[in-house]
Amino acid sequence: MGIHTYFRSLNELERIIRCPGKFKFEEHSVSAHSWKVVQYAKTLADIEERNGVCIDWKKLYEITSSHDYGEIFIGDIKTPVKHSSKELRLLIQQVEEGMIEYFIEENIPEDFKAIFRKQLREGKDDSVEGLILEVADKMDQVYEAFAELQRGNTEKEFIVMYRNALVKIKNIKLKCVEYFLENILPDMVKEETPSSIDIKKITEEALAL
């Protein structure tokens, strides 16, 4: 019981593999994903600050580092399933939030419960920090899918993941998104590797939507 239970539970995030059930050249755990999201968000927030935006760094680190903690209880549900309808996405979120609340009630000391509720909450919202989390989360989907496509992985799900993540990113109105689309994504697409998949064409189609 106690905070030790929370610390111990973090090991489980290392054993939950993203995009389950599909052939992958490289597997990624939820734990590794969360670490990368923090790194993306940190740089994205720096870009926002350089453009005069005030960043709540404590909030940013809290929501980015803990944004997928609930997957300890429900696993990584495939993106096409999770987002097949708003109703299903809401139900999944309600289940996840309910199990996090139960975990906090059963294991976290009373004087820390409010802190854990704040840190483990759903962080994606209309605040600049919530939007940065959304962009960073989708960026990792872009990078994971890109790496598979680059190696010639013909699983359709990775094409869909890559395209949908790019569409989501480009529709978020932040300066860091402009920077990503104008400076980072072109460098990514320019990487020359022999592949049967035309990544440049898929990228251009996604950005045109």
Image (cartoon, rainbow, N blue to C red):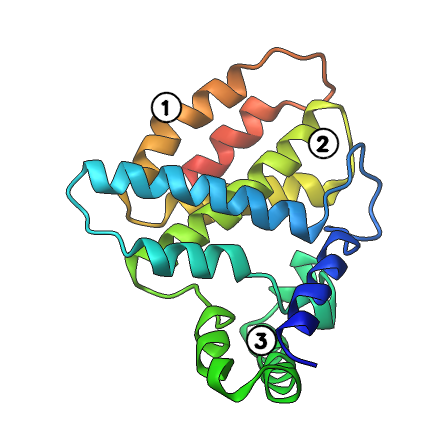
| Image quadrant containing the N terminus | bottom right
Q: Secondary structure at mark 3?
A: helix
Left or right: 71 as drawn, with respect to 140: right
Residue 66 numbered mark, or none? none
Amino acid carrying label 2: it is: Glu
Reading the image, the residue beneath label 2 is 148
Q: Quadrant of residue 197?
A: top right
Crowd band around label 3 with a 10 angstrom C-alpha radius: few (<14), some (14–19), many (20+): some
Q: Secondary structure at mark 1?
A: helix
Amino acid carrying label 1: it is: Asn
Q: Is residue 163 visible?
A: no
How many numbered badges does the structure rendering display?
Answer: 3
Label 3 or label 2, whichever comes before in sequence order: 3
Label 2 or label 1, whichever comes before in sequence order: 2
Q: Position of residue 74 (x, y in %)?
A: 72, 71
Reading the image, the residue beneath label 1 is 183
Left or right: 79 as drawn, with respect to 154: left
| Residue in the foreground of this view, choosing between 157 and 11 | 11
Q: Is residue 82 above or below residue 107?
A: above
Q: Residue at x 80, y 32 (%)?
A: 25
Q: Residue at x 71, y 60 (%)?
A: 76
Q: Residue at x 58, y 72 (%)?
A: 89
Reading the image, the residue beneath label 3 is 93
Q: Quadrant of residue 7?
A: bottom right
Crowd band around label 1 with a 10 angstrom C-alpha radius: few (<14), some (14–19), many (20+): few
| Residue in the foreground of this view, choosing between 166 and 103 | 103
Label 1 or label 3, whichever comes before in sequence order: 3
- Report how far apart the C-alphas of labels 1 and 3 lie in the structure: 34 Å
Q: Is residue 31 above or below residue 116?
A: above
Crowd band around label 2 with a 10 angstrom C-alpha radius: few (<14), some (14–19), many (20+): some
Left or right: 200 as drawn, with respect to 5: left
Q: Secondary structure at mark 2?
A: helix
